[in-house]
Image (cartoon, rainbow, N blue to C red):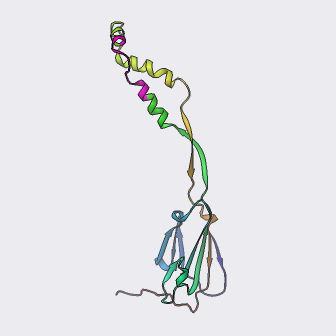
């Protein structure tokens, strides 16, 4: 994560563990990956007049505390075994032989299992059936940007002790 201190003074405490960012000793904890979209996202942390730490609450804005910029999520395209093709092969292997042919096969000494294997062979003789799938990659935390603003002189409501 790229961290930038935008001005002089004390900043809010933060910690990062995998994709989870916590602010102010755990007051706010976010799994940043859950906020990622197919476009860049900005999350603003502000305080209101009562000292509450809020996210994207511009109507109550008293002072900026931090801003996080998340990149658009990335994807990769991979080929996977096509389960639908596998299912259709299994369906083709089911016994669909007419009754008169079954009788002829039994007389010839061919068992039901051998009939199914013979029926499945043409469908599976080619290569494995694959399909192309696009999947979302995990958040690359090295591309996340955190800007910190000084909080000197700003009241942030602290819950000290028990209530």
Residue at the image position 39 percent from the left and 17 percent from the top:
115
Q: Where on the picture, by quarter, is residue 120?
A: top left
Compared to 38, does 54 lie above or below? below
Choose between 20 and 42: the one closer to the eye.
42
Q: Is residue 91 magenta?
A: yes
- Position of residue 146 in the picture relative to residue 96 (left or right): right
The quadrant in which the C terminus is found is: bottom left
Residue at the image position 46 percent from the left and 28 percent from the top:
89
What is the x, y in percent for residue 94? 38, 24
Single out the residue that lies furthest toward the bottom. 153
The quadrant in which the N terminus is found is: bottom right
- Position of residue 120 in the picture relative to residue 59 (left or right): left
Single out the residue that lies furthest toward the top. 107
Segment tinted magenta in the rendering: 90-101
Q: Is residue 7 magenta?
A: no
| Total numbered labels | 0
Q: Where on the picture, by quarter, is residue 64?
A: bottom right
Compared to 42, does 53 lie above or below? below
What is the x, y in percent for residue 140? 60, 61
Residue at the image position 66 percent from the left and 81 percent from the top:
6
Residue at the image position 64 percent from the left and 64 percent from the top:
143
Compared to 7, does 40 lie above or below? above
Compared to 65, does 2 lie above or below? above
- Position of residue 41 in the picture relative to residue 114 (left or right): right
What is the x, y in percent for residue 49? 51, 89
What is the x, y in percent for residue 97? 38, 17
Choose between 95 and 59: the one closer to the eye.
59
């Amino acid at each position: 994560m790229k961290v930038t201190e935008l001005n002089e003074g004390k900043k809010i405490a933060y910690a990062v563990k995998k994709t989870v960012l916590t602010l102010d000793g755990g007051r706010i904890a976010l799994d940043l990956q859950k906020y990622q979209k197919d476009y860049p996202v900005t999350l603003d942390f502000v305080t209101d007049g009562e000292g509450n730490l809020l996210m994207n609450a511009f109507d109550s804005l008293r002072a900026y505390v931090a801003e996080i910029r998340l990149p658009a999520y990335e994807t990769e395209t991979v080929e996977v075994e096509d389960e639908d093709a596998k299912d259709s092969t299994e369906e083709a292997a089911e016994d669909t032989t007419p009754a008169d042919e079954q009788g002829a096969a039994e007389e010839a000494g061919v068992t039901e299992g051998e009939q199914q294997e013979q029926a499945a062979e043409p469908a599976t003789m080619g290569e494995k059936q694959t399909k192309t799938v696009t999947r979302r990659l995990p958040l690359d935390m090295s591309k996340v940007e955190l800007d910190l603003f000084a909080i000197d002189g700003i009241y942030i409501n602290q819950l000290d002790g028990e209530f």
